[in-house]
Image (tube, rainbow, N blue to C red):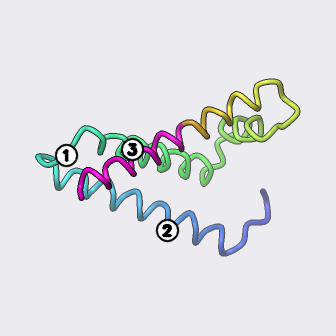
Amino acid sequence: MKNKGIFYYFLMGVLTILCICGIITFLKNWKNNYWWRWIYLFGGSYLLFDLFAIAMGLKFWERLLLKMFDVSASYWNMLWLSFVLLGACSFVLGIRLLFQKK
């Protein structure tokens, strides 16, 4: 990933700003936070760390990301299945909260 275009930096900047805004919003509404909002705090914090590790070029993180996309590895299906399940749970929680609001 030596040749990074302007879109790469733009995307990383937008994601960073959104995560910081989300964390600030979480902290400003401290007394009104429901249990499920902690998911967003931890997810945003993870994404900030991920963006930081990529931007700083941390070697261990780069090796980890390369292993995650190694489709010939025996653990690949289980690893990505966990991400699919995590996304499905987030989707179900979002739909449940949407119906609960109405």
42, 77: nearer the viewer: 77
Kindly identify the residue that appears in the image at 65 percent across and 67 percent down: 8
SS class of the residue under badge 3? helix
Quarter of the image where one finds residue 87: top right
- Left or right relative to 67: residue 38: left
Find out whether residue 66 is within the magenta segment. Answer: no
- Name which residue type carries label 1: Asn
Q: Position of residue 40 (x, y in %)?
A: 37, 47
Residue 46's disc number: none
Q: Position of residue 45 (x, y in %)?
A: 42, 45
- Name which residue type carries label 3: Leu
Kindly identify the residue that appears in the image at 60 percent across and 50 percent down: 56
Quarter of the image where one finds residue 37: top left
Kindly identify the residue that appears in the image at 70 percent across and 35 percent down: 64
Instruction: Please determine whether, in this image, residue 78 is positioned above or below residue 23.
Output: above
- Left or right relative to 78: residue 40: left
- Name which residue type carries label 2: Val
Q: Which residue is mark 1?
A: 33
Which is more N-terminal, label 2 or label 1?
2
State if disc 3 and disc 2 touch (CB < 8 Å).
no
Which is more N-terminal, label 3 or label 1?
1
Cα separation, mark 2 vs mark 3, equals 25 Å
State if disc 3 and disc 1 touch (CB < 8 Å).
no
Which is more N-terminal, label 3 or label 2?
2
**Residue at the bottom extreme of this rendering:** 6
Cα separation, mark 1 vs mark 3, equals 16 Å
Q: Which residues are magenta?
A: 86-102
- Disc 3 crowd, CA 10 A, few/some/many (<14, 14-19, 20+): few
- Left or right relative to 67: residue 45: left
Residue 93's disc number: 3
Residue 14's disc number: 2
